[in-house]
Image (cartoon, helix red, strand yellow):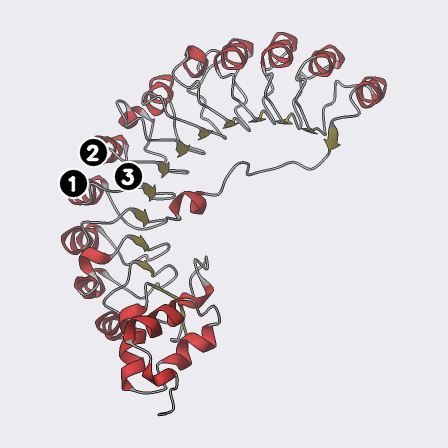
């Protein structure tokens, strides 16, 4: 009987084996066996990123290429790996718009593309992406030089977009967001933190699939808040560091019933938000599980009483450095919030040691923590995983 070895396995079996190799060294050495195995490696690879990437999507997808990836390196890699579905060029700072012409090789097969800190990428490069990659679902353009024009081009060409990261893109305004939200009806998450030209009105009429919006430190207005939640599907909302345009009652629309699915709300450093908004949200968002109210100085007894009375599903509450959280407000939280598990609290100058000890005594089921959390809820990358 003739000896049988691994080289006699059909290509589909070898491809199956390759896709289940977790070790980077094993991935790289697979193709060194023979030309046949090299070809299987080339057509089986679905993800590619580089050592300079800020986030490792998949350790096995790392390339051993020099961190200074240029147009030549990218061209050679993409002509070799033409079946890629996920590509991260994050941190490849020497790439420019013309470098993206090589995206024609994976083309329609590409589902996710990360270009974080690719400072040389502008609207021309985005136009190239739109031409070659119409089936993109995930795009991260953190700190890229994209404007409303480029965003509209991308949105019009990539109707299947689900997750978009535009953080620190100063040239993007409500016009670009409007084009994105109206063209891409499958949007699930949008990150626009620190985009100073965004007020939120561009989200008006957004898809009900939109469940995650991170608009930290944007110049949000009350009409913009209404626009963000207008789709009715919002589950995570971060508007921490809200601008002075949001007054005491500026967040009342969140509690109007449109955002009834909201589970995580970050209002950290929304210093002007008052009891009217807090009471409306507490009543109108019954599924709320985590609420960050750190440094919300205008929340007073009435607001804390509303949180205690209406937030029956709340598990985590952040009240760090709230100047107007007093003993009476803490009593309201103690007597309510029956499902509360963790209370983040420190620097509350109006609280007495006695009130805090009484809270510990009567609510031993709640863990008190003194650390102040800057970020809460799921990471945007979780929404980017398919």
Residue picked out by circle 1: 156
Which-is-in-front pick, marks 3 and 2?
Answer: 2
Task: Find out whether the residues at labels 1 and 2 contact each other: C-beta distance under 8 Å.
Answer: yes
* Quarter assignment of residue 40: bottom left
Callout 2: few (<14), some (14-19), or many (20+) C-alpha neighbours within 10 Å? Answer: many
Callout 3: few (<14), some (14-19), or many (20+) C-alpha neighbours within 10 Å? Answer: many
* Quarter assignment of residue 269: top right
Inter-mark Cα distance, 3 to 2:
11 Å
Residue picked out by circle 3: 172
Residue picked out by circle 2: 179
Inter-mark Cα distance, 3 to 1:
16 Å
Query: Is 117 above or below relative to 296?
Result: below
Q: Is residue 333 left or right of residue 41?
A: right
Task: Find out whether the residues at labels 3 and 2 contact each other: C-beta distance under 8 Å.
Answer: no
For marks 3 and 2 on the same chain, the one whose residue lies earlier in the sequence:
3
Horizontal and vertical percent position of residue 378: 50, 39
């Amino acid at each position: 009987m003739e000896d049988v070895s691994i080289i006699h396995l059909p290509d589909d079996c070898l491809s199956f084996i390759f896709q289940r190799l977790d070790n980077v060294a094993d991935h790289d050495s697979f193709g060194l066996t023979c030309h046949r195995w090299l070809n299987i490696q080339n057509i089986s690879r679905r993800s590619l990123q580089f050592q300079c990437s800020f986030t490792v999507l998949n350790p096995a997808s790392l390339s051993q290429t020099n961190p200074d990836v240029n147009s030549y390196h990218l061209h050679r890699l993409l002509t070799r790996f033409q079946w890629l579905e996920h590509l991260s060029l994050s941190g490849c700072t020497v790439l420019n718009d013309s470098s993206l012409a090589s995206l024609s090789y994976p083309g329609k097969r590409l589902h996710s593309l990360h270009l974080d800190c690719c400072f040389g990428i502008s609207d021309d490069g985005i136009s190239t992406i739109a031409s070659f990659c119409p089936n993109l679902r995930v795009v991260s353009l953190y700190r890229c030089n994209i404007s409303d024009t480029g965003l509209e081009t991308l949105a019009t060409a990539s109707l299947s977009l689900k997750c978009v990261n535009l953080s620190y893109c100063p040239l993007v305004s409500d016009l670009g967001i409007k084009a994105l939200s109206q063209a891409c009806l499958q949007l699930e998450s949008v990150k626009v933190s620190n985009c100073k030209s965004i007020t939120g009105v561009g989200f008006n009429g957004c898809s009900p699939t939109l469940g995650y919006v991170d608009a930290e430190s944007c110049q949000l207005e009350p009409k913009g808040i209404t626009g963000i939640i207008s789709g009715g599907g919002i589950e995570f909302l971060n508007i921490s560091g809200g601008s002075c345009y949001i007054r005491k009652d500026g967040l009342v629309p969140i509690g109007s019933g449109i955002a009834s699915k909201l589970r995580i709300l970050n209002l950290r450093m929304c210093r002007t938000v008052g009891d009217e908004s807090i009471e409306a949200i507490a009543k109108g968002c019954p599924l709320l599980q985590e609420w960050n109210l750190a440094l919300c100085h205008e929340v007073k007894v009435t607001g804390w009483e509303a949180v205690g009375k209406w937030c029956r599903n709340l598990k985590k509450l952040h009240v760090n450095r709230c100047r107007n959280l007093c003993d009476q407000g803490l009593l309201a939280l103690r007597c309510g919030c029956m499902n509360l598990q963790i209370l983040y609290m420190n620097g509350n100058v109006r609280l007495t040691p006695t009130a805090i000890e009484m809270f510990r005594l009567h609510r031993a089921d709640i863990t008190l923590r003194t650390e102040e959390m800057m970020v809460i809820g799921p990471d945007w990358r979780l929404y980017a995983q398919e």
